[in-house]
Image: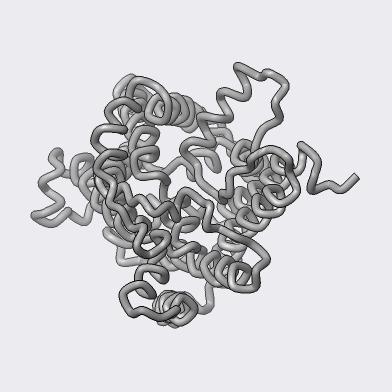
């Protein structure tokens, strides 16, 4: 039997991609929130450069596969002709603020869970349940009104990719030059710093994570072409798939998991293997009720905000970038602002301190 027609193909390929991402992230301490903190407060851009490297690797590989006709990402929700700009802004701000309260994003929480963090288990449980509510529960009623109904129509370009929009305005197909220009600019910034060019471990981690994202588009495209059932074209994201994983555990009806659920499980397993191999497994829990409350609020904001913004720091920051979705820079700018406001709240006692200049104190571990 052709494995691509098997019901196990999607969860298995998701599991493989997740293991690679989890191991790479754990081995090099890849975390968007930590990278931002080091960049803002210590002037260390290595973490941010690794994150951008992952995005550009995913972009180059995805666009190469797309132009070669091997994959087709046009049915991805990231490239819908309807741009939910209010969701990208509101959801991005909420996700970034929640990320600051927790100290990591959904992907980072999965990686930490693999190393024994029970705090991350609390965050992921709240994040997943909040995502389900925002996607199909009571919160979804508000989302439809303030996000879906206010979405901008980009049907004139065919989809919401930056290259398609540019082609529509120019009146000629310039998708390849636009993709090449964006990729070259990102690569130039990543390797502009001489010190970073010698960080081979970080470069390998960014390359592995970006490659896994491109692999996701390939795996789901192959499944869609060979399956008799509808298959969602997707790649890495860690908001809704966390909620789907919870549903899979508590309401299993015989339907096998999809790619996202396999990916979530794989990240935990990959991170756990790395932590075990390095003897770095440490059971951690919240120290007091105040810390628990902060993690509960942060998980809720990330789960709700991630659905509103249609992605997280990996979903919008890497997967959406790889298909050049115009929502990516809008959502990521909002997430970064939200994270900055959250850090100001933690360090200075008020989010408004972000506009007055945040102090140089480091967050306590």
**Residue drawn at the location 39% of the way across and 59% of the way down:** 160
Is 227 on the left or on the right of 74, as rendered?
A: right
Quarter of image, res 69? bottom right
Provide residue 340's location: percent of width, then percent of height.
24, 50
Is 292 on the left or on the right of 239, as rendered?
A: left
Provide residue 341's location: percent of width, then percent of height.
20, 46
Viewer-side residue, 229 vs 39: 229
Provide residue 278's location: percent of width, then percent of height.
66, 48
**Residue drawn at the location 51% of the way across and 29% of the way down:** 243
**Residue drawn at the location 68% of the way across and 66% of the way down:** 70
Q: Quadrant of the N terminus?
A: top right
Vertical position of residue 337 compared to residue 206: above or below: above
Q: Residue furthest right?
A: 1
Quarter of image, res 130? top left
**Residue drawn at the location 36% of the way across and 68% of the way down:** 165
Viewer-side residue, 303 vs 278: 303
Residue 185 shows in the view: yes
How many dots with numbers? Answer: 0
Viewer-side residue, 37 vs 210: 210
Q: In which quarter of the image is the C terminus?
A: top left
Give the colouring mode of the picture.
Answer: one colour
Is 253 on the left or on the right of 124, as rendered?
A: right
Provide residue 152's location: percent of width, then percent of height.
27, 51
Viewer-side residue, 277 vs 316: 316
Vertical position of residue 77 compared to residue 69: above or below: above
Residue 193 shows in the view: no
């Amino acid at each position: 039997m052709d494995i691509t027609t098997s019901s196990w193909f999607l969860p298995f390929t998701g599991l493989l991609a997740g293991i690679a991402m989890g191991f790479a992230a754990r081995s090099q301490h890849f975390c968007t929130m930590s990278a931002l903190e080091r960049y803002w407060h210590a002037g260390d851009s290595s973490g941010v450069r690794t994150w951008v490297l992952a995005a550009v690797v995913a972009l180059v590989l995805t666009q190469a596969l797309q132009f070669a006709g091997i994959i087709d990402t046009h049915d991805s929700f990231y490239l819908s002709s309807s741009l939910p700009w209010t969701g990208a802004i509101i959801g991005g701000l909420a996700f970034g603020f929640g990320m600051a309260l927790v100290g990591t994003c959904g992907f980072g929480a999965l990686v930490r869970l693999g190393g024994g963090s029970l705090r991350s288990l609390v965050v992921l449980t709240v994040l997943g349940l909040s995502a389900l509510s925002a996607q199909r529960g009571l919160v979804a009623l508000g989302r439809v009104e303030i996000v879906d109904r206010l979405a901008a129509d980009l049907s004139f370009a065919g989809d919401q990719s930056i290259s398609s929009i540019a082609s529509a305005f120019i009146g000629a197909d310039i998708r390849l030059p636009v993709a090449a220009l964006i990729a070259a600019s990102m690569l130039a910034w990543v390797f502009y710093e001489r010190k970073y060019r010698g960080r081979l471990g970080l470069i390998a981690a960014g390359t592995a994570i970006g490659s896994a994202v491109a692999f996701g588009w390939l795996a789901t495209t192959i499944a869609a072409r060979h399956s008799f059932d509808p298959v969602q074209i997707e790649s890495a994201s860690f908001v809704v798939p966390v909620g789907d994983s919870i549903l899979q555990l508590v309401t299993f009806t015989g339907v096998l998991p999809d790619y996202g659920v396999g990916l979530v499980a794989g990240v935990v397993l990959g991170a756990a293997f790395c932590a075990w191999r390095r003897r770095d497994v440490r059971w951690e829990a919240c120290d007091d009720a105040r810390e628990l409350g902060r993690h509960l609020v942060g998980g809720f904001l990330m789960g709700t905000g991630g659905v509103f913004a249609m992605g997280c720091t990996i979903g919008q920051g890497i997967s959406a970038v790889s298909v050049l979705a115009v929502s990516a820079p809008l959502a990521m700018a909002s997430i970064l602002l939200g994270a900055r406001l959250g850090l100001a709240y933690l360090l200075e006692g008020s989010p408004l301190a972000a506009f007055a200049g945040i102090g140089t104190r480091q967050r306590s571990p």
